[in-house]
Image: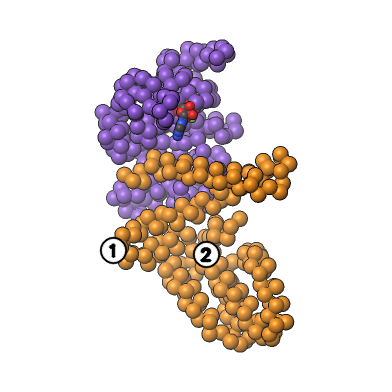
Amino acid sequence: MSAAIGLYRPGTSLLHRAPAGLKLAALVAAGVASLAVRAPWEVAAVLVGLALGYALARIPVAVAARLLRPVLFLLVPLAVFHAIVTTWQHAVVVVGVILALVLLANLVTLTTRSSDLIDAVVWVVRPLRRVGVDPERVGLLMHLGIRSVPVVIELAERVRDAQRARGLTTSVRAFAVPLLVGALRHADALGDALAARGLDD
Amino acid sequence: MLIEFDGVSHAYDEYRFAVRDVTVTLTERRIGLIGANGSGKSTMARMLNGLVLPTSGRVTVDGLDTARSGKEVRRKVGFCFTDPDAQIVMPTVAEDVAFGLRRRGLSKAEIRARVEAILARHGLAGHHDHPAHLLSGGQKQLLALASVLVTEPDLLVMDEPTTLLDLRNARMIADLVANLDQQVVMVTHHLDLVRDFDRVLVVDGGRVVFDAPPAEAIDHYLQLMASPR
Ligand SMILES: Nc1ncnc2c1ncn2[C@@H]1O[C@H](COP(=O)(O)OP(=O)(O)O)[C@@H](O)[C@H]1O
Ligand SMILES: [Mg+2]
């Protein structure tokens, strides 16, 4: 399942209660600050801090680890590459910083409802109202996007199963065409549902 | 509520009419629409909330013309689709229910209270922050229904609400509908669902070919399906 979906774990910790906007701002600030990290001990300190954050939010280690799995495929080769081409210290810094940022981003999504995150984004884009952007529309689009991911994943699984049943396991076209048709049909139905539920009224 | 089709036809393209020359007046509390695939049931159902507008003729709901007063009509008419995945537009259960309450001038507390109440009534009380995609098929249809009913429509139109469900879930939806105060128009292939309705229309080739109490209408439909084309 995609990383952005259904990650939120309800809770009452300080991190859960912190305003979504503040958490987003912290994430951006961390991204900027990460450029200044030079030494392995700095990385270690940051990772310890993050571990405390996860403990504070009562996120089980298994959950945190499961979310990291996809990036490990990237990080392990990257670490090996840097250790060989440069120094192990450099490898630790590069990989450690990416790891820390992913951990932080996951921590934010684990402790924040997607609707609160979206509200924060809607608040940020408010000034764009003057150039014709409707912030509420932006928020709705983000919600629809998040909602559509599992629907399309399910659709892709159905298409793949149908393809297997017919023995066409390698054809890209036999996968892509029905998936596209299904996605367009879904978009159509979603449009009807939005209209029926009074979106433009 | 008074629903009137007055000489209504609809063509999606220039070659064929999906609905042709339908004139009926509906006032009953429970109205069924049955007929073969492609006979025009969905088109008729979608005309009740202005999702489809007549190519000719007029549809009025409670005196409001769906072509001219679409917005007012949709406030009175709730619509439940076959596939809840298309109908659920928000990522989590409570958000989806709250979606229908936007721009109604309700306070956050009021919205929350109404959402809680309707979720409890539909057996979804513990699923407030649940991602919608993790619900079962039956639960999804319950959520879709809850999201429509929270807006307190006077008329509920349902287009094959149980076609994707197993028998147990279909039964559950049927029981729920039976206990609603609202007027209901239901399109279905589950003929059992309309057996205790007040009136059932049989649709064929875009026309209403039979209009009677359920027992006779169902008989007519079964005969129609048994006879060769
Ligand atoms: N969006 C559309 N565009 C073109 N033709 C359509 C569309 N929707 C339905 N039709 C056609 O209109 C006719 C009636 O369809 P519909 O009202 O969906 O029937 P039913 O719900 O009874 O299966 C069918 O021949 C169908 O192919
Ligand atoms: Mg239909």
Q: Residue at x 57, y 60 (%)?
A: A3
- Mark 1 and mark 2 in contact? Answer it, CB < 8 Å: no
* Residue B164 quadrant: top right
Q: Is residue A89 left or right of residue B173?
A: right
Position in image of residue A78 (x %, y %):
67, 75
Residues indicated by labels 1 and 2 sit on the same polypeptide chain: yes
Quarter of the N terminus of chain A within the rendering: bottom right
Position in image of residue B61 (x %, y %):
30, 29
- Name chain B's colour: purple
Is residue A166 visible in the rendered image? The answer is: yes
**Chain holding disc 2:** A
Q: Is residue B76 left or right of residue B193?
A: left
Q: Residue at x 54, y 69 (%)?
A: A105
Helix, strand or loop at mark 1: helix
Q: Residue at x 48, y 49 (%)?
A: B93
Position in image of residue B50 (x %, y %):
35, 34
Where is mark 1, residue-wise? Answer: A130
**Residue A37 or B177: which is nearer the viewer?**
A37
Where is mark 2, residue-wise? Answer: A109
Which amino acid is tagged 1?
A: Arg
**Chain holding disc 1:** A
Quarter of the C terminus of chain A within the rendering: top left
- Name chain A's colour: orange
Mark 1 vs mark 2, foreground winner is 1
Is residue B182 visible in the rendered image? The answer is: no
**Residue B56 or A107: which is nearer the viewer?**
B56
| Vertical relation: B143 (above or below) A45 | above
Which amino acid is tagged 2?
A: Thr
The residues bearing labels 1 and 2 have C-alpha atoms spaced at a distance of 30 Å
| Vertical relation: B79 (above or below) A124 | above
Category of crowding for the residue at label 1, using alpha-carbon neighbours closer than 10 angstroms: few (below 14), some (14–19), many (at least 20): few
Q: How many marks?
A: 2
